[in-house]
Image: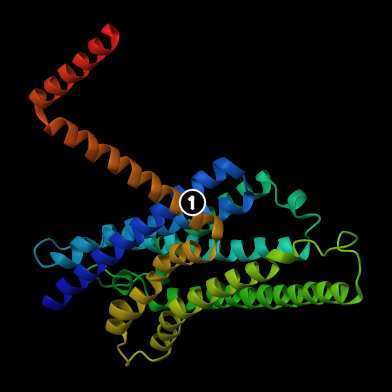
Amino acid sequence: MESSFSFGVILAVLASLIIAANALVAVAVLLLIHKNDGVSLCFTLNLAMADTLLGVAISGLVTDHLSSLAWPTQKTLCTLRMAFVTSSAAASVLTVMLIAFDRYLAIKQPLRYFQIMNGLMAGTCIAGLWLVSYLIGFLPLGVTIFQQTTYQGPCSFFAVFHPRFMLTLSCVGFFPVLLLFVFFYCDMLKIASVHSQQIRTMEHTGAVTGAYRPPRSPSDFKAVCTVAVLIGSFTLSWTPFLITGIVQVACQECHLYLVLERYLWLLGVGNSLLNPLIYAYWQKEVRQQLYQMALGVKKGLTSFLLLLSARDTGPEESRESSCYITTISHSQLDG
């Protein structure tokens, strides 16, 4: 009971941080979209929304661990909660892949990028992404072999989902996505290196700078670095959980459920806390917008405190100051 209570406290803190950080980044990106109307920013906003929903979904599990013995959660409710958690996590992972593909397309086809990735295409990709995510999350509800035959609280992933579901997610979803990540990154790095070499060659030969400049060259390495950090955080966060889940399927006598649910699952969910921190640090426009928002909050608090201090001075001081101002005004008029 004490271990479950401690895990519930950790889960509550993690959920609060995920919701707060991603909501803050979502507001900043929404303001940037209102200013710049960028398609790529819509994918960043979708990532923040997916991670926020993941924080909200895991916050529903907090009460299960804080009071699991007093009010045990029914299996149906636990299955629905874990389905929402899985759907939000899948949406977050797929959005990271969509961002990587968007940056890859911007470098691979710079002249046709805005023709291909227009508002309609971005909306279609986001809508299809959420549809696939909810199909993945709610798949065990329709496929009985992915469900546990017995249920024992508290509510957790393996309390309602069979390890076969983890094996299917790893083989069909995680590892193909990881290979696509590696392909995008390697090709982007190659293109960025070629562009950089072309610029150095032009400068060395004394060519006219305005005659030819590789498109989007200044932002090539920035996009490569952003994708590299996203891939690294995604891989380090979810790989231990999924690989250990595969080991659990292959070795039924290992009993790795406690390690999977108490440590490795939290590590994977922690990726939703890393994503807003990555964008707040690596994206200059997001960082500047957050700074402007902080300045706005500071000015608002300052004005509010000044208003409170003026109200606390009382009517006597206000009346004396007004009389003093009136006396000076009359003397100036007489003069």
Report the front residue among 110 and 126.
110
Q: Amino acid at mark 1?
A: Gln
Q: Vertically, is 136 above or below 329?
A: below
The residue located at (64%, 73%) in the rendering is 180
Quadrant of the image containing the N terminus: bottom left
Q: Secondary structure at mark 1?
A: helix
The residue located at (21%, 73%) in the rendering is 7
Q: Label 1 crowding class (10 Å Cα cut-off): few <14, some 14-19, many 20+? A: some
In this orientation, does residue 143 appear?
no
Tell me the residue that label 1 is attached to: 289
The residue located at (61%, 43%) in the rendering is 37
Q: How many numbered marks appear?
A: 1
Quadrant of the image containing the C terminus: top left
Report the front residue among 261 and 21.
21
| Farthest front residue in view | 335
Q: Quadrant of residue 270?
A: bottom left
**Which scheme is used to colour this image of the protein?**
rainbow
Q: Position of residue 253 (x, y in %)?
A: 32, 92
Q: Position of residue 159 (x, y in %)?
A: 28, 72
Q: Vertically, is 232 above or below 335?
A: below
Left or right: 44, with 314 as reference point: right
Q: Vertically, is 267 above or below 25?
A: below
Left or right: 248, with 35 as reference point: left
In this orientation, does residue 10 appear?
yes
Q: Position of residue 195 (x, y in %)?
A: 79, 72
